[in-house]
Image: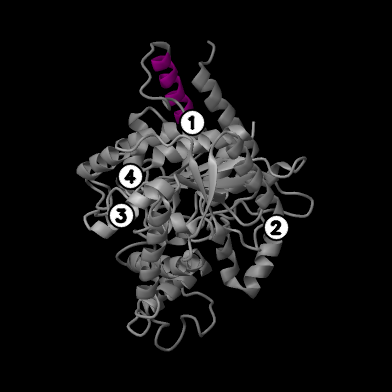
């Protein structure tokens, strides 16, 4: 009996996974191959009858291991959740299954999504398939497992979570497409929270069209998620978008603050070539100013750890999470002090949280303390609002959910319609993926060094805007890992335009 097209594709993906298991993209105890092939055959039968459930019926979708599934453990790559099985699946999982998609398994990540290189995992680091004789290169993070699985054709697409660039950065470093929708358009119900006001379920694929196919299935209001945009607000966004003429040709914004000395020359060259090609197609390039951009990264790394410290407070081994089996052999200054050595949750949290998570909990707890909240947390919130204001000012389309009642705001928006831009195009990262050995040396000298790669991705996260990383060729004759990720960012709710522009840019590299 000959295998159907979808079953053949599934079999090829599973063979790839077996061959590349050393790269550690998937966590242990994922979905069985027999179950995947059986579901593929069922999808083939629907296809043969001309009754597919959706455009992704029968396609294998990998799931980042901080998104709850009912049939596989959800560990968040942490000892605290080792062996944990959620009693319910996340809403995005239910939507994928309703569309006929097949869950390919759970992918590796930085513990609780905290990291930019997928090295902080109880399952071990994710290894890059672009490693050279010089050594292994980082894959990016925290959704590195999802990006690697897609980039090596172990699945059709993958879901990740993007808090400050955790989908877009690994996509840029694996030559894949990484899409972060507008905040609140995709449900977060069933996603283990890192920072509630920033977390967004993102999509990683090998083409923009595939990203749109998955996005069309997972978006929508979810009454279980308090951060999900309500149906009336979604209608308001849609009406706002329909009230403007289709932007053609495009006005493309290039922030002058993004031209920094730390940007790798080859990435700068690829960015310039892409802008020139778009200009040759009739679009216009306009320099814009986002003066608060240089403060965005600092604000993000105050706000995100603050929210994380609150979200992770429940992990104590009593109410939630695994209990530490025995006292750690840790330095007396860490948790074995006379006041802390007999405290159950102190020992448990020290043993079960990795160093990076502990570092961010400490940072977040400090910035929320009574002595520091005014100088750090509240100031970071003000910077976040200024970042949002900067971006709203440069876009031709006004924010669809902000009030437009005052005459001054109306006059400003009227001016933006004439001089504003439709999208902003920038690099996704400052550099190509570094060697893990070099990264560890830098990290020992300066732990904050790893945060620098989020320079281009954090503003969209702070403002809740849609953004997508698209792979384009680097230097001519360059190695495959030198594919450059360029980011397209649009106004809130303008996700379709962002994907349309990404699709056009995708064609530049063919």
Tell me, yes or no, whether the two marked residues, 2 and 1, touch with CB atoms within 8 Å: no
Looking at marks 4 and 2 on the same chain, the residue that comes earlier in the sequence is marked by 4
Compute the Cα span from label 1 to label 4.
19 Å
> Element under label 1?
helix
Residue for badge 3:
411
Q: Residue at x 58, y 44 (%)?
A: 148
Mark 1 and mark 4 lie on one chain; the one further toward the N terminus is 4
Query: Which residue is disc 2 drawn over?
Result: 435
The residue labelled by disc 1 is 209
Q: Locate the C terminus by quadrant.
A: top right
Task: Single out the mark in the foreground, 1 or 3.
Answer: 3
Which region of the structure is painted magenta? 32-47
- Residue at 62% x, 62% y is 260
Q: Secondary structure at mark 2?
A: loop
Can residue 19 be seen from the camera position used here?
Answer: yes
Give the CA distance from mark 2 to mark 1. 32 Å
Q: Is residue 138 left or right of residue 377?
A: right
């Amino acid at each position: 009996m000959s295998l159907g097209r979808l079953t053949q594709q599934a079999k090829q993906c599973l063979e790839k996974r077996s061959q590349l298991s050393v790269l550690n993209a998937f966590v242990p105890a994922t979905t069985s191959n027999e179950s995947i092939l059986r579901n593929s055959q069922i999808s083939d039968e629907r296809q043969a009858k001309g009754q597919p459930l959706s455009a992704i019926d029968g396609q294998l979708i990998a799931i980042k291991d901080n998104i709850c599934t009912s049939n596989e453990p959800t560990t968040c790559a942490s000892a605290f959740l080792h062996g944990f099985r959620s009693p319910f699946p996340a809403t995005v999982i239910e939507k994928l299954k309703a569309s006929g998609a097949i869950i390919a398994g759970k992918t590796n990540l930085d513990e609780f999504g905290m990291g930019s290189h997928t090295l902080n995992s109880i399952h071990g680091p994710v290894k890059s398939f672009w490693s050279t004789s010089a050594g292994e290169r980082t894959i990016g993070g925290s959704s590195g497992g999802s990006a690697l699985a897609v980039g090596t054709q172990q699945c059709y697409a993958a879901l990740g979570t993007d808090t400050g660039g955790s989908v877009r950065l690994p996509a840029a470093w694996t030559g894949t497409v990484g899409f972060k929708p507008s905040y609140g358009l995709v449900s977060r119900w069933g996603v283990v929270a890192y920072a509630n006001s920033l977390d967004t379920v993102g999509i990683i694929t090998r083409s923009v069209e595939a990203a749109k196919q998955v996005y069309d299935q997972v978006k929508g209001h979810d009454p279980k998620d308090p951060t999900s945009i309500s149906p009336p607000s979604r209608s308001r966004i849609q009406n706002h978008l329909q009230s403007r003429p289709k932007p053609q040709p495009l006005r493309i914004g290039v922030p002058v603050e993004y031209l920094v000395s730390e940007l790798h020359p080859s990435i700068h060259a690829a960015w310039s070539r892409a802008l020139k090609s778009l200009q040759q197609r009739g679009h216009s390039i306009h320099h814009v100013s986002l003066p608060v951009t240089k403060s965005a990264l600092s604000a993000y790394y105050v706000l995100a750890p603050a929210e994380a410290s609150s979200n992770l407070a429940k992990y104590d081994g009593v109410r939630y999470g695994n209990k530490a089996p025995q006292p750690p052999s840790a330095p007396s200054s860490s948790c074995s002090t006379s006041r802390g050595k007999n405290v159950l949750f102190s020992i448990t949290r020290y043993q079960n949280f990795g160093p990076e998570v502990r570092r961010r909990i400490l940072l977040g707890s400090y910035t929320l303390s009574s002595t520091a909240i005014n100088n750090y947390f509240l100031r970071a919130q003000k910077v976040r609002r200024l970042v949002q204001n900067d971006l709203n000012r440069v876009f031709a389309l006004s924010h669809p959910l902000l009030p437009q009642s005052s005459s001054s705001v109306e006059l400003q928006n009227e001016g933006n319609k004439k001089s504003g831009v439709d999208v902003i195009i920038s690099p996704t990262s400052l550099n190509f993926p570094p060697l893990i050995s070099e990264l560890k040396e830098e990290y020992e000298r300066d732990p904050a060094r790893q945060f620098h790669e989020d320079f281009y991705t954090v503003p969209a996260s702070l403002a809740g805007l849609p953004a997508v990383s698209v792979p384009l060729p680097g230097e001519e004759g360059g190695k495959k890992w030198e594919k450059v990720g360029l980011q397209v960012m649009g106004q809130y709710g303008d996700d379709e335009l962002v994907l349309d522009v990404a699709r056009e840019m995708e064609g530049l590299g063919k």
